[in-house]
Amino acid sequence: MIVYDRLWETMKKKGISQYALIKDYHINEAQLHRLRKNKVIKTITLDRLCEILDCEVEDICQHIKGNPNEA
C-alpha cells in the first residue's frame, strides 16, 4: 500500500499549505482528498508536487508492505 504521510511533513517543512496548493498551484482539491485518504492518484500529480515542493517522490509517499484489507 502507498501512503502519503510524508507529503504533509514535507509541506510543513517547505511552508506550503493545502490552500496554497489549490489556489496558487492549481492542484485539484479532489486529488488532495485522495492523498489524505491514501487512495490512488495520478502520477502527474506526484510529479507536480515534487516540482512544487522541490523534493523527491520518497519525500511525498512511502510503500508499506501488506494489504490493509486483509485484517
Image (cartoon, grey):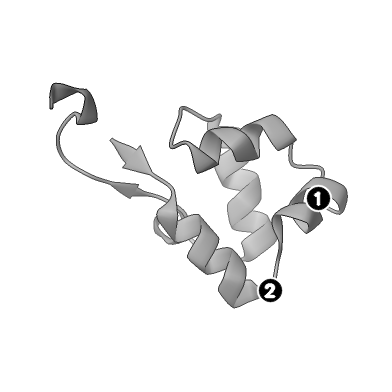
Where disc 1 sits, the SS reads loop
Quadrant for the C terminus in the image? top left
Element on which disc 2 rests: loop
Who comes first in sequence, dot 2 or dot 1?
Answer: 2
Q: Is residue 35 left or right of residue 69?
A: right
In the drawing, what numbered circle is on residue 15? 2
Q: Looking at the picture, which amino acid does disc 2 mark? A: Gly
User: What crowding class fits label 1: few (fewer than 14 Cα within 10 Å), some (14-19), or many (20 or more)?
Assistant: few
Total count of labels = 2
Q: Residue at x 65, y 47 (%)?
A: 48
| Front-lying residue, 36 or 56 | 36
Q: Which mark is residue 36?
A: none
Q: Which residue is mark 1?
A: 25
Give the residue type that dot 1 points to.
Tyr
CA gap, disc 2 and disc 1: 14 Å
From the viewer's perspective, is residue 31 above or below residue 20? above
Mark 2–mark 1 CB contact (< 8 Å): no
* Residue farthest to the top, as pictured: 69
Q: Position of residue 66 (x, y in %)?
A: 14, 34
**Seen in the image, is 63 located left or right of residue 14?**
left
The residue furthest front is 71
Task: Residue 55: tell me if it is visible.
Answer: no
Left/right placement of residue 20 relative to residue 67 reads right
